[in-house]
Amino acid sequence: MEGRFIVLEGSDGSGKSTMADRIGKYFSEKGRTIEFTREPGGTQISEKIRELILDRDNTEMDYRTEALLYAASRAQLVSEKIIPWLKEGKIVISERYVYSS
């Protein structure tokens, strides 16, 4: 069976997690295996990058540096988790993706 990659975008508190749960339940009831991700994060390396990005003490971080950190986190997540899951035919639901950065 073919994998699917579903991305939910929206501001904080807009219902992304609620929708992710509902979509996951829908596909789960149809017998599909579901994997959830978030951005930034989702892997050991990506979570460390997330800490850097969200650290309020990093007030002088250049916007280009921040953008590259988001890209690095995403690249790790895609190669380590998303691509293998899709190849296994899983439904991958991500709260945020490239549109957020």
Image (cartoon, helix red, strand yellow):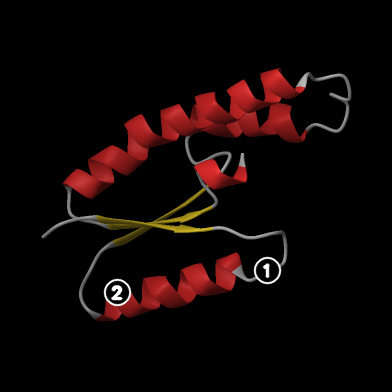
Q: Note whether residue 48 is visible.
A: no
Report the front residue among 9 and 94.
Answer: 9
| Above or below, 73 relative to 20 | above
Circle 1 is placed at which residue position?
14
Q: Note whether residue 89 is visible.
A: yes
Q: Residue at x 26, y 46 (%)?
A: 85
Q: How many marks?
A: 2
| Above or below, 1 relative to 29 | above
Q: In which quarter of the image is the C terminus?
A: top right
For residue 94, the mark is none
- Residue 67 placement: quadrant: top right
- Residue 18 placement: quadrant: bottom right
Binning the other alpha carbons within 10 Å of mark 1 as few (below 14), some (14 to 19) or many (20 upward) gives few
| Above or below, 101 relative to 2 | above
Q: Residue at x 69, y 20 (%)?
A: 64
Kind of residue sitting beneath label 2? Ser
| Residue 30 image offset from top left, x and y in percent | 22, 79
- Left or right of residue 51, residue 70 in this image: left
Residue at the left extreme? 1
Circle 2 is placed at which residue position?
28
- First in sequence: mark 1 vs mark 2: 1
Kind of residue sitting beneath label 1? Ser
Q: Quadrant of the N terminus?
A: bottom left
Q: Which residue is drawn at 35% across and 32% down?
A: 80
SS type, badge 2: helix
